[in-house]
């Protein structure tokens, strides 16, 4: 039971980082990306390769994952600077679909469909942190640190400028905000955080493959942020807990056959997304509109 | 001959895509709703046809039922999902998330009802004949192309010649004109959703008889329609149909040059390139910044 | 008296339609100029061209005699040009105070230049602007939740707090009740007294006569006349155009 709870807590922490990172894009910058799993994946592959080829240091892996994702976030920043609304959603969708193909075909880097296996146990400055409890503590520390950073940034002028752009791009420009630079930075920040989450994920699972970085994953993370409430610190975390506890809770219900749990779970979260958008579009943690 | 064979199957796929994408474009053009649950209408129609065919009903009963189900679903989305959101001035993303949630719901319901696997309705139409040395063609090719041309012609006539059709085209651009015409925008949006959803039916029935259905088809169709609508120029019926045809052909032809895995991605590379370099699409007006 | 802002021979076509053609306009220091003309005369387009939101097809935009043509809007804004929008474009989901703060912060990075003393000065400027616009009580409300007049004043407060020396105001007083309108007129007069150069688009001719030192009359993208308010507003031909007399 303890092991089960530790597992759930670690996954919730990793997805907490992921959801908080998407919240930077969706909630604060108004960039509605549905390609977030791509950057989660990039971080995971980068972290896994670092561990496999060089050194299984989890902190270094987080930095590498973040750096790779931030660098490639330009692929997302480019359409974000050129188009908006439906067009951007379509562009990010295109990016997501292309990335999945690349992930499953670039065998040398990603191991293809088989993925990267045998990622060594995580160390931190030479000490073993791969046990469930130490790893959870490390992941929580990363989450705490990143949330603190997001809070500081979003409460400050950077966050105000981003939100100004979100609410009215032309007015933000008319008050001296460099929209291109700020949007690019916001995308880089959000994607870098997703990369960090990916690196942690790779170590925790000791195995990564493309299945974890598909459109479904992007939608799941988006649902976490939206259901929890955008542009709040707690919202995405609430969303993560709800959507991770849901399958756990369902497996305790005797009348659902185990093979159908996946579909029932999808059904519930699809329904939750639609109903929330109709009745409470700001999410559970958000204020009323 | 391989090239010709791939071209022919590309045209068959493309005809189905073209009709479905035209439905999506019709709805978007008239109501400005990014109806990503359009794929769900397609899936529902396909599975209705399948269920009745398996129960032993003749094909036209199945097709009729598919039509009723698809139109009912379109109207249901308009009345119970989009209208309430638009009433409290939800942003486009609110609409998008709600529609996405509904397509997840539909997909999981189908999974619960019909299982995850591929299902096909057997039909004598799909038996292939050798028309040229090495070139095989099934009668269904002619059905697909014929139905697509016929319906596209009929819809174009409807939009250009009838009062309601002209009203549909004016709905998003010129609401004053509607009042002068004595048409109500509520009724017109019903017509758009009904007609647009109906356009997904032939594709669904044909797909059920050829490549077969699976629950995830809703998402695939949604992606293709969306890509075709953007590449064609959002809101342009002609553009969407042409781009749908193009995507079908490209998807099939890519196989002759690259591995099959790349074929699905090819369409999205086209989509991404269009958004970056020509966001107005083939036939669209310039995107308003 | 200097001419901090001037426009020379500005041209802009939209799809073959001339929105602005060959317009010259000088904004003289401390002088309030009103742009007057029927709907569709190209007044707002002229603002968009002046602030870099739209790139002109031809002509010059000079700030202190130096060309700023082709510069992006945020750079032109940083040189001391502030504008309002007809549809306000407030930062809707942010608080009133944050709207003004976001408008005046010189950079968006973690540290603002000038450290603590500059930060205190900025807060004082925000407080002063909110006070002068009568928004102190609503400082923590979200912009979308404000009443109509309050939103209009918030759009002015954003400009006021920046300390910009050139204001371009797009229909700032439309729809205001008499009390609010008086407050607005006083705000503009105070700003002019502090040396601000103002150009405003306004349909209400009472406000124009109350505030403007000069009027530039636009119709169909061209400047038909410019001069003192009495001259322009007594010209029967211009007034005819303004009130939509049949044009031949």
Image (cartoon, coloured by chain):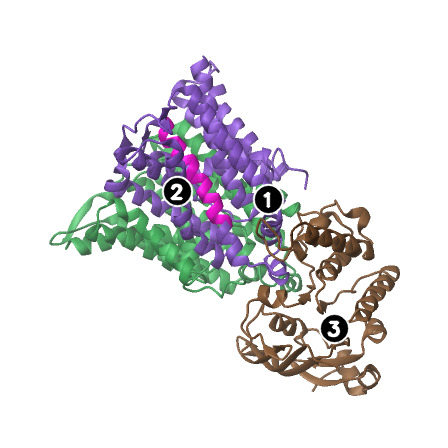
Chain colours: A purple, B green, C brown
Label 2 environment density (alpha carbons within 10 Å; few <14, some 14–19, many ≥20): many
Residue A196: % across, % down = 43, 37
Q: Nearer the viewer, mark 3 or mark 2?
A: 3
Q: Nearer the viewer, mark 2 or mark 1?
A: 1
What residue does disc 3 label? C197
Q: Are marks 2 and 1 on the same chain?
A: yes
Secondary structure beneath dot 1 equals: helix
Using the image as rendered, state which of residue A101 and residue A195 is in the foreground.
A195
Label 1 environment density (alpha carbons within 10 Å; few <14, some 14–19, many ≥20): many
Instruction: Name the quadrant of the N terminus of chain C.
Output: bottom right
Residue visible at 38% across and 29% down? A125
Residue B268: % across, % down = 36, 51
Work out which residue is located at the far left of the displayed protein and give it: B133
Please tell me how many numbered marks the rendered image carries. Answer: 3
Side of C57 relative to A216 (left or right): right
What residue does disc 2 label? A38
Q: Quadrant of residue C73?
A: bottom right
Q: Label 1 marks which chain's residue?
A: A
Question: Which badge, 2 or 1, comes first in the chain's sequence?
Answer: 2
**Image: magenta residue range:** A186-204
Q: Quadrant of residue B154?
A: bottom left
What residue does disc 1 label? A154
Q: Label 2 marks which chain's residue?
A: A
> Do the residues bearing badges 2 and 1 touch, measured as CB atoms within 8 Å?
no
> Do the residues bearing badges 3 and 2 touch, measured as CB atoms within 8 Å?
no
């Amino acid at each position: 039971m303890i092991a089960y709870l530790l597992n759930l807590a670690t996954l919730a922490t990793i997805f907490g980082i992921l959801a908080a990172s998407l919240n930077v894009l969706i909630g604060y910058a108004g960039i509605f990306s549905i390609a977030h799993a791509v950057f989660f994946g990039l971080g995971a592959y980068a972290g896994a390769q670092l561990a496999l080829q060089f050194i299984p240091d989890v902190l270094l892996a987080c930095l590498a994952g973040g750096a790779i994702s931030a660098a490639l976030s330009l692929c997302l920043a480019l359409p974000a600077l050129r188009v908006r609304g439906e067009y951007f959603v379509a562009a990010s969708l295109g990016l997501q679909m292309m990335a999945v193909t690349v992930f499953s075909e670039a065998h040398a880097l990603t191991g293809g469909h088989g993925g990267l296996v045998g990622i060594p146990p995580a160390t931190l400055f030479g000490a073993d942190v791969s046990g469930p409890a130490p790893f959870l503590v490390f992941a929580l520390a990363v989450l705490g640190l990143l949330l603190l950073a997001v809070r500081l940034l979003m409460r400050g002028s950077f966050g105000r400028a981003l939100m100004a752009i979100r609410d009215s791009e032309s007015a933000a420009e008319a008050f001296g905000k460099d929209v291109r630079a700020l949007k690019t930075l916001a995308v880089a920040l959000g994607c870098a955080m997703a990369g960090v989450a990916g690196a942690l994920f790779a170590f925790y699972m000791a195995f990564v493959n493309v299945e974890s970085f598909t459109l479904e994953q992007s939608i799941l993370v988006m649902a976490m942020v939206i259901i929890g409430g955008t542009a709040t610190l707690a919202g995405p975390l609430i969303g993560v807990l709800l959507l991770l506890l849901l399958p756990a809770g369902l497996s305790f219900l005797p009348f659902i056959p185990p093979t159908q749990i996946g579909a029932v779970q999808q059904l519930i979260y699809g329904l939750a997304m639609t109903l929330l958008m109709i009745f409470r579009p700001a999410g559970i943690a958000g204020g009323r509109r | 001959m391989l090239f010709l064979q791939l071209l022919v199957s590309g045209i068959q796929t493309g005809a189905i895509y073209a009709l479905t994408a035209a439905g999506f474009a019709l709805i978007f053009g008239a109501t400005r709703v990014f109806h990503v649950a359009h794929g769900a209408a397609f899936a529902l129609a396909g599975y209705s046809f399948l269920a009745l065919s398996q129960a032993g009903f003749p094909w036209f009963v199945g097709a009729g039922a598919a039509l009723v189900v698809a139109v009912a679903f379109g109207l249901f989305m308009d009345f119970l999902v989009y209208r309430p959101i638009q009433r409290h001035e939800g942003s486009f993303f609110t609409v998008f998330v709600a529609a996405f949630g509904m397509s997840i719901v539909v997909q999981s319901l189908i999974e619960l009802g019909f299982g995850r696997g591929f299902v096909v309705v057997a039909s004598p139409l799909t038996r292939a004949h050798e028309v040229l040395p090495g070139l095989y063609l099934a009668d269904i090719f002619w059905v697909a192309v014929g139905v697509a041309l016929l319906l596209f012609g009929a819809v174009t006539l409807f939009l250009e010649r009838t009062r309601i059709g002209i009203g549909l085209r004016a709905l998003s651009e010129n609401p004053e004109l509607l009042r002068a015409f004595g048409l109500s925008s509520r009724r017109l949006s019903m017509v758009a959703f009904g007609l647009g959803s109906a356009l997904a039916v032939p594709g669904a029935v044909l797909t059920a008889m050829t490549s077969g259905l699976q629950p995830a088809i809703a998402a695939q169709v949604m992606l293709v329609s969306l890509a075709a609508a953007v590449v064609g120029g959002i809101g342009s019926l002609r553009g969407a149909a042409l781009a749908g045809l193009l995507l079908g052909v490209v998807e099939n032809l890519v196989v002759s040059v690259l591995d099959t895995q790349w074929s699905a991605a090819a369409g999205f590379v086209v989509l991404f390139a269009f958004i970056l370099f020509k966001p107005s699409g083939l036939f669209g007006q310039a995107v308003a910044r | 008296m200097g001419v901090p802002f001037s426009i020379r021979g500005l041209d802009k076509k939209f799809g073959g339609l001339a929105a602005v053609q060959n317009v010259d306009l000088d904004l003289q220091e401390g002088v309030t100029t009103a742009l007057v003309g029927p709907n569709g005369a190209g007044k707002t387009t002229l603002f968009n061209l002046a602030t870099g939101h739209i790139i002109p097809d031809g002509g010059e935009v000079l700030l202190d005699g130096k060309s700023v043509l082709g510069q992006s809007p945020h750079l032109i804004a940083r040189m001391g040009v502030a504008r309002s929008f007809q549809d306000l474009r407030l930062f809707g989901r942010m608080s009133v105070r944050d709207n003004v703060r976001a408008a005046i912060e010189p950079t968006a990075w973690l540290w603002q230049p000038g450290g603590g003393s500059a930060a205190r000065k900025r807060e004082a400027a925000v407080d002063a602007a909110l006070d002068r616009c009568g928004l102190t009580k609503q400082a923590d409300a979200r912009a979308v939740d404000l009443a109509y007049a309050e939103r209009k004043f918030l759009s002015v407060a954003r400009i006021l707090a920046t300390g910009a020396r050139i204001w371009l105001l797009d229909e700032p007083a439309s729809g205001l009740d008499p009390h609010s309108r008086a407050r607005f007129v006083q705000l503009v007069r105070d700003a002019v007294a502090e040396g601000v150069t103002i150009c405003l688009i306004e349909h209400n001719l009472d406000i124009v006569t109350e505030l403007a030192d000069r009027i530039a009359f636009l119709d169909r993208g061209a400047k038909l006349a410019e001069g003192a308010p009495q001259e322009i507003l007594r010209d029967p031909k211009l007034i005819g155009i303004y009130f939509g007399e049949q044009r031949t």
